[in-house]
Amino acid sequence: MKVVTIGEIMLRLSGEGFLRFVQADKFDATYGGGEANVCVSLANYGHDAYFVTKLPKHEIGQSAVNSLRRFGVKTDYIVRGGDRVGIYFLETGASMRASKVIYDRAGSAVSKADPSEFDFDRIFGDADWFHWTGITPAIGAGGRALISEALKAAKKHKVTVSVDLNYRKKLWSAEDAAKCMAPLMRYVDVCIGNEEDAEKCLGFKAGKTDVASGELELGAYRGMFAEMRDAFGFKYIASSMRESHSASDNTWSGIMYDGKEFYQSRKYQVRIVDRVGGGDAFASGLIHGLSAKPDFKRALDFAVAASALKHTVFGDYNLVSADEVETLLQGDVSGRVRR
Amino acid sequence: MKVVTIGEIMLRLSGEGFLRFVQADKFDATYGGGEANVCVSLANYGHDAYFVTKLPKHEIGQSAVNSLRRFGVKTDYIVRGGDRVGIYFLETGASMRASKVIYDRAGSAVSKADPSEFDFDRIFGDADWFHWTGITPAIGAGGRALISEALKAAKKHKVTVSVDLNYRKKLWSAEDAAKCMAPLMRYVDVCIGNEEDAEKCLGFKAGKTDVASGELELGAYRGMFAEMRDAFGFKYIASSMRESHSASDNTWSGIMYDGKEFYQSRKYQVRIVDRVGGGDAFASGLIHGLSAKPDFKRALDFAVAASALKHTVFGDYNLVSADEVETLLQGDVSGRVRR
Amino acid sequence: MKVVTIGEIMLRLSGEGFLRFVQADKFDATYGGGEANVCVSLANYGHDAYFVTKLPKHEIGQSAVNSLRRFGVKTDYIVRGGDRVGIYFLETGASMRASKVIYDRAGSAVSKADPSEFDFDRIFGDADWFHWTGITPAIGAGGRALISEALKAAKKHKVTVSVDLNYRKKLWSAEDAAKCMAPLMRYVDVCIGNEEDAEKCLGFKAGKTDVASGELELGAYRGMFAEMRDAFGFKYIASSMRESHSASDNTWSGIMYDGKEFYQSRKYQVRIVDRVGGGDAFASGLIHGLSAKPDFKRALDFAVAASALKHTVFGDYNLVSADEVETLLQGDVSGRVRR
Amino acid sequence: MKVVTIGEIMLRLSGEGFLRFVQADKFDATYGGGEANVCVSLANYGHDAYFVTKLPKHEIGQSAVNSLRRFGVKTDYIVRGGDRVGIYFLETGASMRASKVIYDRAGSAVSKADPSEFDFDRIFGDADWFHWTGITPAIGAGGRALISEALKAAKKHKVTVSVDLNYRKKLWSAEDAAKCMAPLMRYVDVCIGNEEDAEKCLGFKAGKTDVASGELELGAYRGMFAEMRDAFGFKYIASSMRESHSASDNTWSGIMYDGKEFYQSRKYQVRIVDRVGGGDAFASGLIHGLSAKPDFKRALDFAVAASALKHTVFGDYNLVSADEVETLLQGDVSGRVRR
Amino acid sequence: MKVVTIGEIMLRLSGEGFLRFVQADKFDATYGGGEANVCVSLANYGHDAYFVTKLPKHEIGQSAVNSLRRFGVKTDYIVRGGDRVGIYFLETGASMRASKVIYDRAGSAVSKADPSEFDFDRIFGDADWFHWTGITPAIGAGGRALISEALKAAKKHKVTVSVDLNYRKKLWSAEDAAKCMAPLMRYVDVCIGNEEDAEKCLGFKAGKTDVASGELELGAYRGMFAEMRDAFGFKYIASSMRESHSASDNTWSGIMYDGKEFYQSRKYQVRIVDRVGGGDAFASGLIHGLSAKPDFKRALDFAVAASALKHTVFGDYNLVSADEVETLLQGDVSGRVRR
Amino acid sequence: MKVVTIGEIMLRLSGEGFLRFVQADKFDATYGGGEANVCVSLANYGHDAYFVTKLPKHEIGQSAVNSLRRFGVKTDYIVRGGDRVGIYFLETGASMRASKVIYDRAGSAVSKADPSEFDFDRIFGDADWFHWTGITPAIGAGGRALISEALKAAKKHKVTVSVDLNYRKKLWSAEDAAKCMAPLMRYVDVCIGNEEDAEKCLGFKAGKTDVASGELELGAYRGMFAEMRDAFGFKYIASSMRESHSASDNTWSGIMYDGKEFYQSRKYQVRIVDRVGGGDAFASGLIHGLSAKPDFKRALDFAVAASALKHTVFGDYNLVSADEVETLLQGDVSGRVRR
């Protein structure tokens, strides 16, 4: 399957271990971003995964490209130019101390890109799937224009489209988000988003749910999903479910709706190594699952197991193979040494 | 608020991660000590925090000064001279393996300091609060003389005085401790100490409590606190409460008594990153709380939340802001990423 | 007590923290192997512990020797020659992601060694105990010949013999293992092995046990141990018991049988730092316990406590002292800082 | 002496050792910038050194403040606000491979600062010296306005003013530089700049000099300095002189003119550890020298020795004491161990 | 230009800095090998560079693939299978202490590969250049067969062929080398080799040259090159020239002969960061130069400048761009900071 | 040969690379001291090398023991007890910036040891050589008593005795040194010391020599050696000769006198990695040379080559083999890669 994702890849600077920002004299330099993370994961699963963005010509831009190539992503469509690579600083939390992200992404090359720099017909001509997230239109006019043109081209070439709504309050208001995102939903076949995303990006509400505690009212979700489907004609709606007991321990699961059935996956207790990119691992698992599994329930099971594993992997990227996910799906959470 | 603390700051040498001493080929070099830790924490909360000690003129002494300055502590009153900076080696435990401390602090500059080297009238003339611990008199004649003169000056200038009893069996016997400490209690407004401290430093006993298991008989504590108050006239008596399930997991809370009411805080489950300095974070939280909160119960709540957070921070210093403590006080222990 | 162990010591290359193999740009280089691990642990307990193997003359071979010397093992009987030091790569798992081992040990110097290179009369002339594992005959003709000659010499010199069956499916088939191992059992006084080892190496079966889940049927074990004892005349049969809840948390205990009584130790909840070498720590604890403790039950208790502690120590070697094990045996799992 | 410097402090991200950007998976995080570097050095020499800038409230901004406090700089006048801390990436060269800098500083808090945010009367009221560089006006309108207002206030309070012209071609054209800088020269007492700076910032030309080779025509310099003095009325004009044999080895010296005499210092052969900040170390050495030495020649000697030493210190800051410079001034370049 | 190289890529394990093997507790893990190094360098210069080899399916094999992809090499033709990745350990020397290499490469997947696993018609069908080295036939029957079949296919498809003779005395005798290599020379257009290679691999002799001292008799070389050309019909013969003053400082140049003219390049003084791969950087520079430069002299100049730069880059790979080589070719060895 | 050395081994804490003390957030922890360094080097050369000292029972003491065992030193005679391990902090210089040592060794276990704790008859009964340095009597009464008793026992058992005078001005005055050292010289067969040592420890003077510059007047040395020999009856007198061009580059050689001939070795240009322990490497090379070489000139040549190599090895210990020294002795300073 040829999969395309479009968005921003950032330089991620994280202190060592659990050091606070003010203690950090070194940063681990990795790269990540919602759409890039999905792309790496799909390359791991064996797909021809293309990441599309714009990156400066200098060596930091090149390092972002190299990071993608290293893990098998095709970078042929990446445009080179512009001034800077977006950056985010990450402080890793523990116990009741939350992880913190400081964004320094304004003015990145892709946020100022022009759609004319990309040959969307070439990109989507032989593509099977296009995935994007609500972050890209939020980063600036460049991102908005890019997604808009990409969606038209994708539809023209009959490419399946998935979106992860991913509302980011630092990037735009709910009002701006809804105004931009709602019209784009008609291009979307598979919609991923939790309650907050649905409310902020699309104006929907799941009823009373306490996001911080992670206690979820499934009934409310089911109703919200049905309404969303009615409004936008999605084929599938799905969401990962995180119950945050602390920065160190979460319960992880997922729900999905196909217009008829509402399905909830099993739950995993995760001891967290790095939870950034967990949602992206869910999205990529779902895309792979829908392409490789006989029904949407098993696709969801794959997505949940894959993204549970992501929480044990350092960095944004979910560096697990389909075989490793399958092993977990077969029920072995024992973590016994494989030799 | 101008706060003064007096004591010893040591070079702390800790191996990487959970390495045992005999495996360590590198040491992380940080600085800490009960009174210095309290001072850094109070500087974080926005107070004018002065740490008073004596340190050698050489670069290891300078590095201790720099470590304090870096985190906002005023070092104007630090006297330079003497031969060595006290050292402690730290091995970080996990699960049922306890952390270990090897002290190499004998002969440090401050343990041999002379009170005449310090201008206590200048130090305390415009001060609001003076905090000290039972460690300083225990490290040697210099420390004892320093505290004695400092207490007199503090009283003269009507400075509020708090003490953390902090009994250290490697430094002195219970007999010596009691002989030295009891007479100093009349200068003290706020006394912090757990059952063992009260017994060893002041001769009190809380009844049957199993320190190792951390199961506490609150009734016994209440009685002991009342007796202590009667004997020494403290305005407040407080103690942190640690239930040690293992080197990795503790339950953390605190108790406090104002002569009328005995108050117990909520309990936090802490997954430990670094528990050294937890008690000092409690003391500094209490000092800040008593100065900023409307009643002693909320002061205790602040102290307990602040020191629970300390357990997630590497090093002796509690590098958390008052805002971060407030967020935890509002009940969110979910550890969800802040972005 | 003079103890001898014979086998292969490998260079262990493990990535930093929880990094996956494909992320590792650095490897921590330590050394380990079943018999070497037992030897280091016995040296820690104060025994004259000799490790016998063959290692190349080059610096990687020398580094393996140095690693043993550093922790007190006598290396006088190590023969130098051959081409390579066996290697194993280790990826450390977390939560539901299992640790992984990639072996690169074929053709190691000891796997091709000739018994004539070793003076077994000198080695065993004044020895008290000989320990070996089922790995050494599995690595090649050299290993098999070595163990065979060593066992003869040990018996000749009336040395107590213990074995850890340690079946490794990557090294040989159950059929080959049984054919080789069964005849060697007549030299053995103390046999250590879990159900899988007994089945694969000796052809025994403990009934229905789910190794992955770690739920054990003790009744079945007791029957199997009795049969094994009848068949081979072991004085003691023992096994560690691991219940793997995840790669991060295990429950650890042990069982032992002396022909009359079947004894089960207490259970420890272990938060894992490094579980490789846990079984070897059990074996060395048992050897020390049987030599130093008044009865086999207390020997087992020592072995279980010692190997529980191992799970908190980085590397293959169990770098804990007998004193530390005793402290844990007295019941203090609180992990409170020792200062 | 109370010294004030105003400018931008950046987060410096440098790879380990000589790694190229595309190899760097970790960055050392330090802080630096022309005016901040001068300030740290002057604090080392014992002056009351104040650095004035604007930095975001978040933890990266705080870390920049902490870095200054750590080394004794007064940060009381730093305004907190704005969005980002400027960044520069540094790749350290060796032999014929040059070091590389990638700037990512557009939009930093200080580049958008408003002079009204600073109380220049308070800042300069009791100040003795004000140092600035040509970089600050180049970074944006905020920087230009800041310098302009600061110079007025400095003159009003009779503060000695020094400038390091520091032309940066990535920040502005020679035309823009000259238009902005020339009018500001009337506030300047001490002007530091090499031939390229003088040409690009002020329109002067030293005749034929090959900057790359570092072969200098002193006669041409003397003439240029005389003309500059005539044009702008500087009391002193000085320049460091670098002969770049390779990225690893340079020859370092300085020249200075007081309107009557043209003086050239001795030359030092430097084996380079980190040459960034070498020019700033020259400037701070000169400021200290002019305040502490009996004549301008010895001031220059101090500046050259101090900045030669800087080349052996990692990071932008010149962490050497006045005593260490004096030792070198006395002629001992032997580098024998001091114990 | 589509370029193909075939050979072995090894895991390189080097200690930190100048640590000796017996001090190394960590190894930097990079990947390299003569042909892979050439391929990475050509990818850097913008060519479609394909590396052909066989690597195990496990994660160490995958990491070797990822290392190539990261730097732009096409890995489509790499066959996956076999047991192990060859390893070499590297100790970095300094001053009069030489660097040391310990090879642990016996039995690598590619050394046992079968030509039938590769589709040479597909590989060479549209290729422009094929480069190989004398190492590949030396590692085993698999390597020999691979090269033999590859050369036939390359000739069939009219691909230009270059070889770096690269005699390795640890891998085979001069006798075996000559027997194998001489017949393969008829496929070769461009032959790279120094005096020792020519003698050991082809039986030629340059007269008296002291390899250790690096003093070279150019006249003897010219004669040898002419004889070699007569014997094998090479279009070009070239050699890099290393004068080893110490492990830290070398003089580097090159010579080349086209049947008519014998040309010697300029000499570079190199302060060494990592000299492994210097010869491979020369080969790749020559291949690029011959394809991009107007005459063979400028090709040699490019090759020498490129490989001089390699000595300043950590790892086997020459991570420099063609632009960077051009800058050096223009004569700037000053190493001034590029900003 | 059984060799015994007695003295103090310290924990050495050195910052990473060229970091200054005030920049160091990590310390590399190694162990060293004059006599221990000599012992490790002799173990490397294949001798039975015993280091005698007193070290605390805690883990830092144990780590010192382990460091010696790791490199083959026999630690059987080390007494365990006392409070602390001496420490020294090391800052590594570069170019004209000198390395710095801060000693924190007062009160170490061995400085307070009592000779009665050691069984000198057992230690020296079968010994061939005893080496000590002037540092041990300087560290305290314990050290003085130890050396005094050891010398008597060594003489009693006809053990050859060598001394390295090693004057340390931080430890004692020239007056105290001379009073203590001169009487001990009658036990000494081989005396090592430079001009400063001879002057300060024994009251001799070589005439005008500028130690800092390293320009040496050999004639003066010859006269001084002859006088020293006349006064104390040494069999051999030797000294290493360091010409310090900078902290990065030295010229290294040695001189020796046997009562008849005065011999000067060849000179080595050394690019310094770590010069601490260079003198100890000279002493151990001389001891080995005198035991293994046919004449004292070749012994000196060995000593100089061995200690030149030391300058390229990190840490106090000279981790080079006799074979490596021989290779250098044969004149190859080219540093070409050994593979």
Image (cartoon, coloured by chain):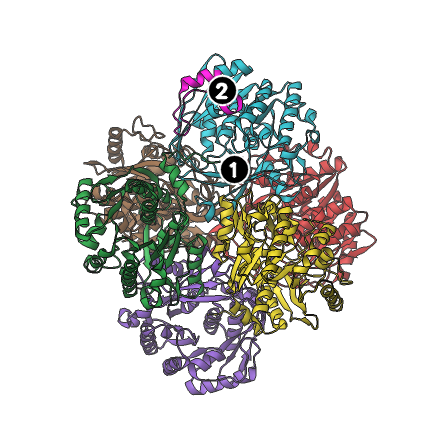
Chain colours: A purple, B yellow, C red, D green, E brown, F cyan
Q: Chain of mark 1?
A: C
Any magenta on residue D317? Answer: no
Query: Which quadrant would residue E121 be assigned to in this image?
Result: bottom left
The amino acid on which the numbered mark 1 sits, given as a three-letter code, is Glu
F149, A126: nearer the viewer: F149
Tell me the amino acid under the disc marked 2: Phe
Q: Give the residues in magenta.
A: F198-225
Asked if residue F229 can be seen in this view, the reply is yes
> Residue under circle 1?
C59
Of the pair F51 and D46, the residue shown nearer to us: D46
Q: Along the line of sight, which residue is nearer the eye, A234 or F17?
A: F17
- x, y percent for residue D139: 29, 61
Residue picked out by circle 2: F204
Kindly identify the residue that appears in the image at 47 percent across and 67 percent down: A277
Q: Position of residue E55 (x, y in %)?
A: 45, 52
- Image quarter of residue D171: bottom left
For mark 2, name the chain. Answer: F
F201 in the magenta segment: yes
Point out residue C325 in the picture as x, y percentages from the top left corner. 71, 50
Crowding at mark 2 (Cα within 10 Å: few <14, some 14-19, many 20+): some
Along the viewing direction, whichever of A31 and A76 lies nearer the viewer: A31
Residue E280 appears in the picture as rendered: no
The Cα atoms of the two marked residues, 2 and 1, are separated by: 45 Å
- Across the whole image, how many numbered discs are drawn on residues? 2
The crowd level at tag 1 (other Cα within 10 Å; few <14, some 14-19, many 20+) is some
Give the number of the disc on residue B290: none
> Residue pushed farthest front?
B156
Name the side, left or right, on which A296 lies relative to B178. Answer: left
